[in-house]
């Protein structure tokens, strides 16, 4: 029995990276019914004659639904400043989504070269830096050393609006890297879901999922009871409210609201927190 990581799934064929080689394996019948393996899973693989099969799945530290991937360290939230335009509310909600899944958000700013006056956006970005979020900037021709250091040794997924520059970013980090999802989508035909496809590629000494990232900002199926604990802006003031179950909306002596009034918390992040907690649509 050997331990490996699933790095690609096409239909029911699983590519497993073992210590010294990659192999194609299929799961046991019982395993498929119990809990389907996803990309990123650590699995125990056994060789039966000339074929490999997945015997069991190791416990996961986290699991994302879209993309279907497990054991993720961080999400690179690729955020363009132009075409599409910068949106603090979209950025906030992506940060909250990945944080709820126990994945570290990394903010990656693209298309700064297309903005004439960046001062207003810089004011917004300062809130994220002040709260403790990693904020990186990349553009055509940038050396991206900081970004490479962030990716090094980690499992990363990409998320962000279509057109924000996710493909261009990865192709810049590794000129030999080509995203295959668009080609596969065209080959399958729009709207077909006969083939599951997700893959981890080695980029900058890390593993990066070549999926388009999160396809939905739906919080309705998520457990929001610990949402306040996922927000770095709130961290210094948590557990200082009068009530242990304070939701930071109308309760008296709320440390979060007091910090907000004192200009210590990103107002747009608080606004999105309130909308999500109240179940309001985006």
Image (tube, grey):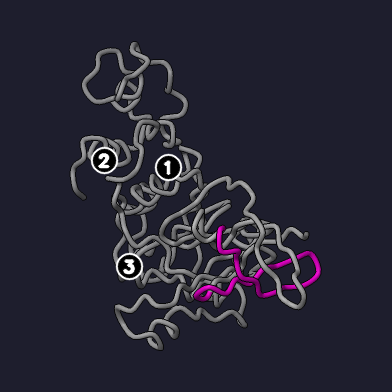
Q: Name the residue nearer the viewer: 72 or 161.
A: 72
Camera-side mark, 2 or 3: 2
Q: Secondary structure at mark 1?
A: helix
Q: Secondary structure at mark 2?
A: helix
The residue indicated by pointer 2 is 276
Tell me residue 240's x, y (percent). Answer: 41, 15
Question: From mark 1 to mark 2, how far is it between C-alphas?
Answer: 12 Å
Is 121 left or right of 172, judged from the image as shown? Answer: left
The residue indicated by pointer 1 is 100
The residue indicated by pointer 3 is 82
Is residue 27 inside the magenta stretch?
Answer: yes
Q: Earlier in the sequence, mark 2 or mark 3?
A: 3
Is residue 109 inside the magenta stretch?
Answer: no
Q: Residue at x 39, y 60 (%)?
A: 214
| Badge 2: residue crowd in 10 Å (few <14, some 14–19, many ≥20) | some
Tell me residue 32's x, y (percent). Answer: 52, 61
In the image, which residues are magenta?
10-30
Q: Residue at x 51, y 59 (%)?
A: 36
Q: Residue furthest left?
A: 280
Tell me residue 17's x, y (percent). Answer: 70, 67
Using the rendered view, name the quadrant where residue 2 is placed. Answer: bottom right
**Quick check: marks 2 and 3 in contact, CB under 8 Å?**
no
Using the rendered view, name the quadrant where residue 117 is placed. Answer: bottom left
Q: Name the residue nearer the viewer: 162 or 255.
A: 162
Q: Secondary structure at mark 3?
A: loop
Q: Name the residue nearer the viewer: 269 or 225.
A: 225
Question: From mark 2 to mark 3, how far is it between C-alphas?
Answer: 26 Å
């Amino acid at each position: 029995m050997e331990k490996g990581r699933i790095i690609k799934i096409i239909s029911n064929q699983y590519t497993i990276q073992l210590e010294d080689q990659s192999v194609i394996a299929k799961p046991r019948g019982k395993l498929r019914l119990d809990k389907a393996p996803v990309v990123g899973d650590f699995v125990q693989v056994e060789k039966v004659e000339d074929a490999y099969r997945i015997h069991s799945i190791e416990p996961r530290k986290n699991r994302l639904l879209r993309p279907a991937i497990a054991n993720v360290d961080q999400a690179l939230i690729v955020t363009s400043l132009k075409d599409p335009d910068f949106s603090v509310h979209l950025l906030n909600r992506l940060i909250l989504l990945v944080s709820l899944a126990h994945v570290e958000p990394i903010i990656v700013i693209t298309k700064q070269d297309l903005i004439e006056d960046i001062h207003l956006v810089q004011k917004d970005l300062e809130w994220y830096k002040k709260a403790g979020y990693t904020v990186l900037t990349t553009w055509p021709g940038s050396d991206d050393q900081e970004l490479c250091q962030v990716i090094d040794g980690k499992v990363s997924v990409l998320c962000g609006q279509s057109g924000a520059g996710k493909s261009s970013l990865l192709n810049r980090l590794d000129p030999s890297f080509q995203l295959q999802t668009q080609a596969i989508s065209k080959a399958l035909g729009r709207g077909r879901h006969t083939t599951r496809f997700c893959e981890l590629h080695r980029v900058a000494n890390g593993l990066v999922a070549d999926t388009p990232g999160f396809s939905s900002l739906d919080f309705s199926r998520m457990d929001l009871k610990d949402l306040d604990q996922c927000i770095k802006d709130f961290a210094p003031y948590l557990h200082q409210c009068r009530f242990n179950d304070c939701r930071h909306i109308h309760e008296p002596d709320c440390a979060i609201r007091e910090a907000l009034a004192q200009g210590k918390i990103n107002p747009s992040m608080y606004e999105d927190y309130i909308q999500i907690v109240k179940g309001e649509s985006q």
